[in-house]
Amino acid sequence: MTTILSRFSKPLQLFLVFILLFMPSLGFAAAATGETLNLTNHTVGYLALVVFVIAYLFVMAEEFTHLRKSKPVVLAAGIIWAAIAVVYAQNGFSHSAETAVRHNLLEFAELFLFLLVAMTYINALEERLVFDALKSWLIRKGFSYRQLFWLTGILAFFISPIADNLTTALLMCAVLLAVGKDSPKFVSIGCINIVIAANAGGAFSPFGDITTLMVWQKGIVDFSAFFLLFIPSLVNYLVPAAIMHFAIPNQTPEADDEVIEMKRGAIVIMTLFILTITTAVCFHNFLHLPPVIGMMTGLAYLQFFGYYLRKTHMNFSTNNASTNFDAEKAERMMGEVVPFDVFQKISRAEWDTLLFFYGVVLCVGGLGFIGYLSLVSQVMYIDWGATNANIAVGFLSAIVDNIPVMFAVLSMQPDMSLGQWLLVTLTAGVGGSMLSIGSAAGVALMGQAKGKYTFFGHLKWSPVIMLGYFASIYVHLWINADLFNLPANL
């Protein structure tokens, strides 16, 4: 079938696909009634494109403007849907826009609550000094720069599947900055290594990245199937790390003797977090309930344990005061004056990220409702083929945030095998490592290690990172070849 895009040359098709994927869609939500209008050539369609592009330019310029990324996209979402509603009302479809936007809100609500619980647990672990204790242990051991390079990378790779890649990257970067203050070169290359490792580790776990979480919650890929990406993800990390190893100074920094111990209840909270993830998986796999129901149940675990910590706080203090227990150590272990309040942990969630997520979902949902998605779907998954399209997704993720890119693919619902769905999950997750601005971890580390880890410092190693990118794709196509003949759970 001839489409509008097929009239253009190949280079122009690539450009148009990039522009349209920059503003993908969540849905066909109008849907249920079939009352949809093609507004791609309407003034409202052009207005929506312009509004979203301007909003996303502000998002990309956050580092320079210091304007939180959620603000422009939340505003753009309201403008886009208001314009759509006006046109539909003028054409006698008063409730079609309402139906569509409710569908988008349901998609957002499930992911929002899931992420909120995960962020609450991470903040609780941070307040209980779990991450600080790990950092102090690494610094005390007196490892060489090369040993720290590998330790921080390996830890980032294995922590990010459980914690988010942003938190993992910030923790490991703090270690680099503490021990590498006299070696900017070590910090720069170490940060690149951490970004690659955190993104690669998140790609083989349903909890490691928002994109993998979206694919799992859609029910396209089973929970256990994600772990088939473990070896390709490991290759994605190891190939560039092995090359960068030789650029690390072969020296040993001065060790620090500071000891940080975890606060009371830290290990229990770690156990409850694992139990919460298990609950979410069981609810989804055995009860066929959305994973978010299991996560919210797990939040109750933390709430009840927080209640226990508060009630026993004074007893813990009194008992230790009557013994020879180190008073200063007891005070550190007890935590804050208000011993533990789960709602304080909720309030410390990354609200800018969650609201940005809301804005993106509503914006791209509106653009999809207008009718732009079918144009991109034709070019990518029919003209190019699934494998080429999915590899291109990784390159787009290095420039554009991988959340809207993955939304586009999920919304297209291309007829792909399980192997192809795992491929796009892999490329969307690790493709952002090719540029420092391609992932939340890279952007955060540029701020944390300002002047030492930079865009151009990362860019110098992009060819090596790209080598790991293609190596991971090749390994997936090789070891998971049989999955390309299996249907996904669509």
Image (cartoon, grey):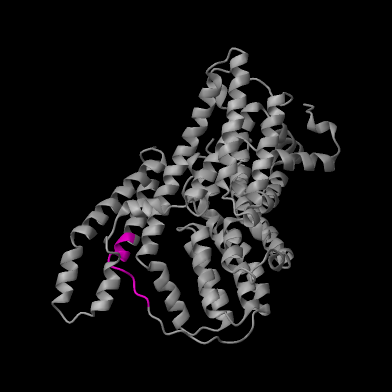
Q: Which residues are magenta?
A: 260-269
Q: Quadrant of the N terminus?
A: top right
The location of residue 464, given as percent across then percent down, is: 71, 66
Image: 172 above or below 439: below
Residue occupying the point 68% across, 26% down? 44
Res 432 visible: no
Answer whether residue 455 is visible to the viewer in this image: yes
The prevailing secondary structure element of the residues shown in magenta is: loop
Q: Position of residue 437 (x, y in %)?
A: 65, 57
Quarter of the figure with the C terminus? top right
Q: Residue placed at 51% from the left, 71% from the top?
A: 174
Front residue of 301/472: it is: 301
In which quadrant of the rendered view does residue 455 lie?
bottom right
Horizontal side, residue 182 vs residue 121: left or right: right
Residue 423 locus on image (x, y percent): 62, 49
The answer to if 11 sits in the magenta stretch is no
Relative to 59, is 410 above or below? above
Residue found at x 64% / y 70% = 451
> Viewed as shown, does residue 290 lie left or right of 227?
left
